[in-house]
Image: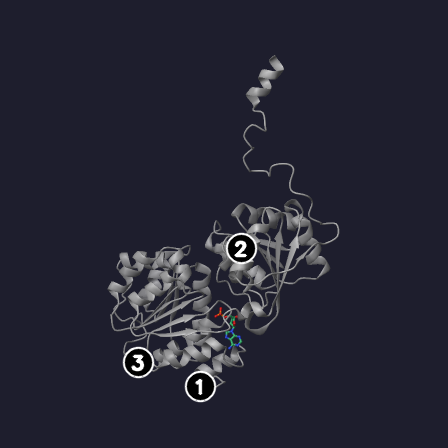
């Protein structure tokens, strides 16, 4: 079985798949679609970039159109929970695009914070078939009694490991109380740590498990490069690389909101079309920033992890770890944004004396070891002489203002 036709998808879905330019199913789609179609519960270990979204959206759309949920399209039949607003918008887009030729008009709504709740209430009153939600806003709607989960036949937890990171267990219990216990539950997660397995045990019934041998596949077609460079020379090196290597669509990861704002600003001053994306922006500003980047009007997106999580930019060429990610797993997540669905990408990391040890941990946990490079003119200097700005002065080394005053008076 290798084609979408072989997966037994109806023509209106095959047409949509073709319209989106998917030629052949990805491994996760090949494995998951038959299992979901058969109606059982599922745990799937699949990363962003593996094609996991279509792996659940396609069989769910088939189920809705066949009326197997036995409910009308104006009541909520499917709830997909996701950890971030961006991912909610993206997944709801996939539902809409893949559902565009459905004989029954499937109505999809993204239920997320940052957008007016009143609009979402109005949409729900008119009738919605599929809800793609972040837990907080969905809870708000449940608490207000404006969403009815009684007819939900399918529940999807997308990026379940990240959902647990944002602490959604309490909300989940409330949602489950409102849903029929006879439902299909699908859990997708990039990794399967014990907490995720426990969650699966608690809420799924006789589920199948899909783990792909090639789970690091998105990394396989990404060229990883590591540059040793002083912290205060990173921006200059970044600009040099962008210009010399003609990078298109570059996603630069930084550790903080401030860094995201500052770096984007400085890059703009140097003539680069850069935008900043971080959790402090309003939802509208986030959407605008992403739009500018996706359309190519901005070639560089400077983002924090949380803001960038789950965003899907098909033509992303380069991901830069300007600041290293805290967890080794996030490293894979970050670089998995390039080289998606078969395309090749570049992932660049900057390391210095202080971050070298942390990068080694990242390498060890992910079972690889990368060669360090230095670019002439940007060589790493000896270990820092001055304490880094922001780090506390070492006790006994620096004299306090009071001490200085005393000396000058003596
Ligand atoms: P996902 O892992 O769901 O975030 O999907 C990653 C990217 O792969 C998205 O840009 C999808 O549009 C794309 N994609 C999904 N399935 C396929 C497929 N069968 N062939 C080509 N691209 C795909």
Q: Closer to the camera, 95 or 349?
A: 349
Q: Nearer the viewer, residue 174 or 42?
A: 42
Q: Secondary structure at mark 3?
A: loop
Give x and y (percent) for residue 373: 68, 56
The mark that comes first in sequence, 3 or 2, is 3
Establish if 238 lies above or below 185: above
Task: Name the secondary structure under disc 1.
Answer: helix
Quarter-of-image position of residue 189: bottom left
Hey, which quadrant is residue 196 in on the image?
bottom left
The Cα–Cα distance between marks 1 and 2, rounded to whole angstroms, is: 48 Å
> Quick one: label 1 or label 3, which is nearer the N terminus?
1
**10 Å neighbourhood of mark 1: few (<14), some, or many (≥20)?**
few
Query: Does the closest atom of ligand 1 sit within 8 Å of the Cβ of label 3?
Result: no
Q: Is residue 3 above or below residue 28?
A: below
Is 104 positioned to the left or the right of 353 in the image? left
Q: Is residue 197 left or right of residue 310?
A: left
Residue named by callout 2: 361
Choose mark 1 or mark 2, whichever is in front.
2
Most extreme residue toward the top, as rendered?
Answer: 410
Q: Residues within 10 Å of mark 2 (few under 14, many from 20)?
A: few
Image position of 246 with respect to 265: above or below: below
Mark 3 crowd level (few <14, some 14–19, many ≥20, 10 Å Cα): few
Is residue 105 something one can see in this rendering? no
Q: Give coordinates of residue 175: x percent, y percent.
A: 29, 62
* Label 1 near ligand 1 (CB < 8 Å): no
Mark 3 lies on residue: 68
The reply to whether the C-beta atoms of the residues labelled 1 and 3 are less than 8 Å apart is no
- Left or right, 164 with reference to 25: left
């Amino acid at each position: 079985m290798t084609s979408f036709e072989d997966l037994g998808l109806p023509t209106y879905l095959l047409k949509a798949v073709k319209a989106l330019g998917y030629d052949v199913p990805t491994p996760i789609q090949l494995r998951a679609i038959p299992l979901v179609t058969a109606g059982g519960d599922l745990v799937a270990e699949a990363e962003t970039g593996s094609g996991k979204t279509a792996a659940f959206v396609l069989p769910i759309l088939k189920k809705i159109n066949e009326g197997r949920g036995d409910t009308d399209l104006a009541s909520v039949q499917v709830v997909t929970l996701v950890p971030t607003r961006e991912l909610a918008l993206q997944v709801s887009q996939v539902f809409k695009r893949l559902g565009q030729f459905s004989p029954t008009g499937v109505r999809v709504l993204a239920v997320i914070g940052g957008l007016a709740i009143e609009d979402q209430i109005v949409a729900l009153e008119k009738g919605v078939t599929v809800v793609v939600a972040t837990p907080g806003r969905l809870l708000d709607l449940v608490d207000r009694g404006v969403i009815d989960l009684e007819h939900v036949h399918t529940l999807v937890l997308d990026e379940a490991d990240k959902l647990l990171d944002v602490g959604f267990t309490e909300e989940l219990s409330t949602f489950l109380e409102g849903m029929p216990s006879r439902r299909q539950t699908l859990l997708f997660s990039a990794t399967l740590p014990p907490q995720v397995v426990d969650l699966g045990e608690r809420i799924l019934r006789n589920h199948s498990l899909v783990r792909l041998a090639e789970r690091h596949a998105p990394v396989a077609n990404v060229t990883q490069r590591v540059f040793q460079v002083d912290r205060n020379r990173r921006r200059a090196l970044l600009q040099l690389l962008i210009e010399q290597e003609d990078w298109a669509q570059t996603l630069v990861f930084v550790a903080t909101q401030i860094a995201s704002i500052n770096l984007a600003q400085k890059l703009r001053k140097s003539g680069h079309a850069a935008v900043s994306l971080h959790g402090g922006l309003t939802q509208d500003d986030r959407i605008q920033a992403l739009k500018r980047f996706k359309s190519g009007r901005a070639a560089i997106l400077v983002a924090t992890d949380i803001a960038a999580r789950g965003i899907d930019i098909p033509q992303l060429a380069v991901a830069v770890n300007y600041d290293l990610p805290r967890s080794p797993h996030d490293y894979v997540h970050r670089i998995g944004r390039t080289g998606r669905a078969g395309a090749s990408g570049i992932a660049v990391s900057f390391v210095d004396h202080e971050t070298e040890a942390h990068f080694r941990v990242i390498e060890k946990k992910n079972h690889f070891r990368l060669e360090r490079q230095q670019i002439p003119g940007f060589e790493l200097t000896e270990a820092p002489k001055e304490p880094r700005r922001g780090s506390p002065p070492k006790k006994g080394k620096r004299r306090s203002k009071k001490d200085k005053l005393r000396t000058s008076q003596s």
